Image (cartoon, rainbow, N blue to C red):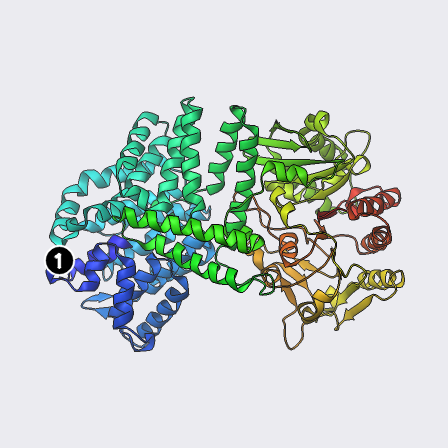
Amino acid sequence: MIRSLACILAALGLAGCASMQPVEFQHLQQNRYAELRDVMEQKVPVLPQAKTSDLVYLCFAYSKIRQYDRLFPCIEQMERNVRAGDKMLFWWDFSSTPALLRAVAAMEFGDYAKAIEAADVAVRLTDPPQSYRQLRIYALSAAGLARGLAGQREAASAFADKLAAAPAAGLEVSDKYLGLARIHMALGDYAEAYDFLRRDDEENAFLKGMTNLVTGSALAGESLFTYWEMPVRFMKSRALLEMGRRDEARAGYEGLLREAGVAQSADLYWLVLFDRGRIAEAENDPAAAAAFYRRAIDEIEQQRASIRAEAAKIGFVGDKQAVYRNLVGVLVAQGQVEAAFDIAERAKARALVDLLATRQQFSSAKVPAEARGLLDELARADAGAAVQDVSAAATRSRLRTAQGELRGRLQASAPELASLVTVSTLGLAEIQARLAADETLVEYFGGGDRLFAFVVGRAAIQVFRLDGRGLGAEVEKLRRQFIDTPGEGNPLPVLQALHRRLIEPLRPALAGERLLIVGHGPLHYLPFAALHDGNAYLLQRYALRLLPSASVLRYLKGEGGRAGKLLLLGNPDVNDRKMDLAFAQAEVEAIARAAPGATVLLRKAATETAIKRDGKRFGRLHFASHGVFRAEAPLRSGLLLAPDGENDGLLSVDELYALDLDADLVVLSACETALGRIESGDDVVGFTRGFLFAGARSIVSSLWSVDDRATSELMVAFHAAAAKEGRAQALRRAQLAMLEKYRHPFFWAAFQLTGEGR
């Protein structure tokens, strides 16, 4: 909507000679959104007193600098104004503007359902189109693009047809073509997208040039290129690349890279570098490809925000994880195994940062005052880097230096916190030093057809190329069998096929009796203990533990001082009799009988408040309850506990990062507690990562809804064994005992250990 608002205001006669324009419009034209915000905040010190004609500028500024904490209150005030009748600026009706701003913000957050809902409101408010012709074009474009990004191909195409049929004249035709191009980019219809971009150039180049000249936008030459033309030129180059016209695409990207302003737009710069690396890789120039990929990763890692800020401008979401995957592939091909392993670890750290990027509240006990101040400074520096004048390369360089210094200070002050808000990894030598003498680390990494397994021992690292074709579908087939027909059927054919694919090629490098597995993508959903070599389950050959990334080894502390104190929460009363777990209560009572001095909280006493208030007093925590998994909002996944006057009973993943524990062991004897969201490649950040940050050293959790009785038996056996030996061996011993009684892996393979195994 950058040009949209400028064109509307230009049409209103507010865009003549630059010296005659209101200062807010000059800032708008020159893309100085931070300055626009400052001017409008002085003009509008109190939102409820603001007119819609001012809120249009203010909300637009907040949208462009991604100041979402202020954008949404601004939109809400504009909506109140519109309901009160304040919706006109001269003859233009801005009723649809709040909905359009909401749609753009939702697309940037990747919340396409909300984007569709908001865009549909804008479509309704711009009907009949004769009255709101240009805003109608923006509304139809947003509705089609949101559906395209959501994968709703048929619905997106229908809106593209509506947009194509919408009446337009002058620059409205250009807006139509760009909207159609974005929708087709989202659908992967690159030839159609390119055709609309070409038609826009042929039919509207003169009119756009004259409009820029008349409005004075030419005075901001570099800004104009960066914010108006660069996304369009990128779309053309990406379309040409996907159409197989590599030479033309290369020329387009080289032209972009020669423009000084491109490097100042970090959100798009990494995509340009990534595609240029793809071209070099296709041309068998791995050194050049690696250089472009590394530059792209450097840009990515300067950004904390998980917002997909270019989606509304270029019609698709850039997959940051793809850059890491491609670089790992190039480095492996060049024999640079250690460097490839480091990039794989950085990819996992990046995924974690993306998921938690907008989170500012962490456990106050784990974040010293100095670190909290540094976190605030880093947030301000990141925001500043996002809104600087694009012509100020020196300013950008200074800000990036400041960002780097702040990250270094945060790493020194609070390394565990730094791992959540910046990309930081552990070196190979330190990882090797933290492995047990009889333990081998197996870390999987890849995507699509490419899958690598890094096998790390105390003295060496090897990498294996594996077959990644159809892996996600095969894992899903196994899970569906366990979930849809629990305890029935014969899963061995799939378990043996997965063993042949994932374990058998590595066997010569697997030494010792312990495996530390770091999964990736769909492998986070795989019960490795149940993989079968034709003679035995993996569980029968190795003691297993898991980690979300190898670098987490740095944060696994030694034994705590409360190892003997056990807190058991069982069968919480969640105000729904269908959710009662009779065997969970029996499980807790049986464990308590074997553990004198244990504290037991049942039914209404098993509250979320009890954990938040007293959890730190215990060295072992055992939850026998339901867990909920929300793929669309992973931080709102959680454990269902009893509600009370202080808390709602959902101990969410988001809340775990503000929880302060000191526990050697957390047992989540609940449904689906090891599940987290697999982002565009990795990292599952669910209960396990949250509990590790909260202060747990080991977590036992489940991959699917488990049998109530079998779980009770397994947990009693596990706690009995854990009192005598290491936790990985204790879980293995309990599962082997269950294997003797329940041959089907459904009953015992769901549980896995994450974290410290000793």
Q: Nearer the viewer, residue 553 or 279?
A: 553
What's the residue type where badge 1 is placed?
Ala
Q: Nearer the viewer, residue 501 or 90?
A: 501
The answer to whether 99 appears left or right of 443 in the picture is left
- In the image, 96 versus 524, the foreground residue is 524
Quadrant in the picture for residue 435: top right
* Label 1 neighbour load within 10 Å: few <14, some 14-19, many 20+: some
Total marks drawn? 1
Indicate left or right for 422 with 724 as reference.
left
**Residue 532 on image: x %, y %:** 77, 33
Q: Nearer the viewer, residue 287 or 449?
A: 287
Q: Position of residue 704 (x, y in %)?
A: 71, 50
Residue placed under numbered mark 1 in the picture: 18
Please say if 483 is above or below 238: below
Left/right placement of residue 682 relative to residue 385 reads right
User: Residue 682: x percent and y percent?
Assistant: 56, 44
Q: Is residue 47 above or below residue 34?
A: below
* Residue 301 in view, yes or no: yes
> Is residue 360 shown to the viewer in this render?
no
In what element is the residue under mark 1? Answer: helix
Residue at point 65%, 77% (across, down)? 645
**171 versus 657 height, above or below:** above
Residue 225 is situated, as x and y percent measured from the top left of the image, at 23, 45
Q: Where is the N terminus found, in terms of image quarters?
A: bottom left
